[in-house]
């Protein structure tokens, strides 16, 4: 799945791109694979992804305890390439 919406914010003359995404994840507790709406994604200064909405397993209700599946990694790779193009292009 690709990012569903792109929103550009101008803050102090620096453009940031926010993408609302659904990412494929696996629960660490029960190993259930699911798609999670994580809202907007951003990256901090050390490269850690920051989700707007913390993922919750729909099966066991574990909160923010997930692995990224190979499909989820592909989805995040697409987001990251857009993120780099936005950061480098500005």
Image: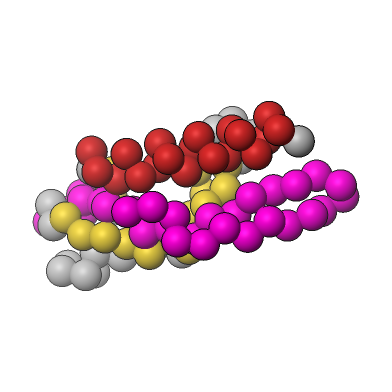
Q: Position of residue 28 (x, y in %)?
A: 20, 49
Residue at horizontal 73 percent and vertical 57 percent from the top: 9
77 lies above or below 35:
above
46 lies above or below 35:
above
Where, quadrant-wise, is the N terminus in this rendering?
bottom left
Instruction: Count up the numbered dots.
Output: 0
Q: Quadrant of residue 86?
A: top right
Q: Is residue 10 toward the left or the right of residue 75 in the image? A: right
What's the magenta bit mostly, secondary-structure-wise? strand
Residue at horizontal 75 percent and vertical 47 percent from the top: 15
Q: Is residue 79 toward the left or the right of residue 60 in the image? A: right
What stretch of residues is rendered in magenta? 1-30
Q: Position of residue 83 (x, y in %)?
A: 57, 39
Taking depth in this image into account, of 9 and 46 the one nearest to the observer is: 9
Q: Position of residue 33 (x, y in %)?
A: 16, 55
> Is 58 contained in the magenta span?
no
Q: Position of residue 35 (x, y in %)?
A: 26, 60
């Amino acid at each position: 799945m690709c990012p569903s919406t792109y929103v550009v914010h101008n803050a102090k003359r620096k453009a940031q791109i926010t993408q609302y995404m659904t990412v494929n994840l696996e629960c660490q507790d029960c190993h259930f694979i699911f798609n999670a709406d994580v809202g907007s994604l951003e990256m901090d200064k050390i490269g850690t992804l920051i989700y707007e909405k913390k993922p919750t397993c729909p099966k066991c209700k574990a909160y923010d305890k997930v692995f990224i599946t190979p499909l989820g990694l592909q989805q995040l790779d697409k987001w990251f390439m857009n993120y780099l193009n936005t950061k480098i292009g500005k």
